[in-house]
Every structure is written in structure tokens, then in C-alpha cells.
Image: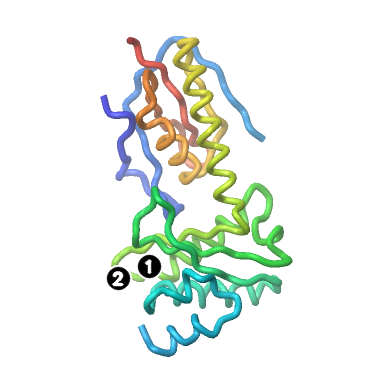
Amino acid sequence: MEPFDHDASRPSHDPFEAFDDEDNAEPYETTFDQGQAEEGEAMENENDPTASDFDRNQPPDERAQSAKDFLRQVLIEMDMDVSIERHPPRPDSSIDEIHLEIVGHDVGRVIGKKGQVLSALQYLVNRAVNRPGLPRRHIVLDAEGYRHRRETNRASLARRLGEQAAKEGKIITFEPMSPRDRRVVHLALAKFPHVVTKSDGEGEERRVRIIPVRR
């Protein structure tokens, strides 16, 4: 049995899609809760004092530059004292992914409560850059490592709870999470022995269940 399947029939409001799995429920359950082309573009990267070393050394990328320009304008309109750097995709991401990092004095305001402002900005940038007729490029926004730390912690938690579910033979259910957060849990447990994961619920109430598999 595959650990999870992509649910293509369900629309998602997040650039990253949710994953689902066939139900294999046990009779016992407990709930876990937790509160970028043109030469001018290349010159801009070279002369931009806030550009990362990775960004300066990359060939011109019109879509990445478009994403940076759009995001920069939005942040200016929001009166945020921050700058934008482009970083390489992470090892577990597609090579076509565009990873933008927001740094600066107002980074806390950019993140917002539980990362809600950061997620909204990511959604806007993806909608602005991924116009009809263009190949899809995932744009991931982070803010001084906030998203990376959060995802690393969530994946570690998922593995601990996976061990608990397998040991106790009980289903463990997370609190409702965003599509991207659910994806982190599914991927963390994709090859985990003796458990599968499944997303249940609709809209903002959609959550992940860790389900032990009979040996």
C-alpha cells in the first residue's frame, strides 16, 4: 500500500498541493494539538547590495526577477523595512523552484501570526508569476529561516508521533493545518514503517491522521 496519493480532484488555495491516502483506520484514536531575460536584469543582480551570492552568480531568470519585483512592490506598499534575497532550491525541492528569502527589520511583521502574512504573500506572488500559458514555477517565500525551521520541527514531530502511533496501535490526529504543512507531515512519514497518513476534513478543518498498519 502506498503511503499517500495526490488528491487532484480537490482544489487548493495553496501553491503546494495536499496529499491524501486510502483509509485504513484502527478502532482507537487520540488527537494531537499544537497551538526572476535581459542583460539589465543580470546587471541588477550584480549591482544589488542586498542580493545573495547565489543570486549574483545565476544566469538571468525572468520569472525569478518578476517574482522579486512583484514582492518588492507589495512590501513597499506595506511599508515594510525589509529586503529580498534569492536562494538555491532545497535538496528535496524541484530545481525549477524559486526560493525567495525576506530579511530585515520588519521581518516579524512579514511573518505574522503563525506565518499567516508570509503564506498570504507567497500565494499572491505565485498567482502573479504563474500566468496562464506559462510553465508553472513554484515560488517559496521564507523570512529569515522561519518557514524552514517550522517545517523541520513539524517533520521531527511527525516522526515522533509516527513511532508513538505504531507502538500504541492508535490513530493520532493533528490539529487542522495548511496544505503545505500537511504535505510536510505526509513526506516525513512517506517511508516510515508500520504507519500510513491520510488527510480528512474539508477547507480549514482539513487535518492529517497517522494510522498504524497491522503487521
Q: Which residue has dot 1 on it?
A: 130
Q: Considering the image in quadrants, where does the N terminus appear?
A: top left
Query: Residue at position x 59%, y 54% from top?
Result: 145
Q: Which residue has dot 2 on it?
A: 134
Write down the quadrant of residue 157 in the picture: top right
Taking depth in this image into account, of 82 and 59 the one nearest to the observer is 59
Image location (x, y in percent) of residue 40: 43, 89
Q: Amino acid at mark 2?
A: Leu
Taking depth in this image into account, of 18 and 80 the one nearest to the observer is 80
Which element carries disc 2, helix, strand or loop?
loop
Above or below, 45 relative to 13: below
Q: Distance from label 1 to label 2 (Cα)?
A: 6 Å
Image location (x, y in percent) of residue 133: 27, 71
Residue 30: assigned label: none
> Along the horizontal axis of the image, is 97 left or right of 9?
right
Query: Residue at position x 47%, y 31% from top?
Result: 208
Q: Considering the image in quadrants, where does the C terminus appear?
A: top left
Query: Residue at position x 59%, y 73% from top?
Result: 74
Above or below, 84 relative to 41: above
Taking depth in this image into account, of 137 and 19 the one nearest to the observer is 137
Q: Are marks 1 and 2 in contact (CB under 8 Å)?
A: yes
Q: Amino acid at mark 1?
A: Asn
Crowd rating for badge 2 (residues with CA inside 10 Å; few <14, some 14–19, many 20+): few
Image location (x, y in percent) of residue 44: 50, 85
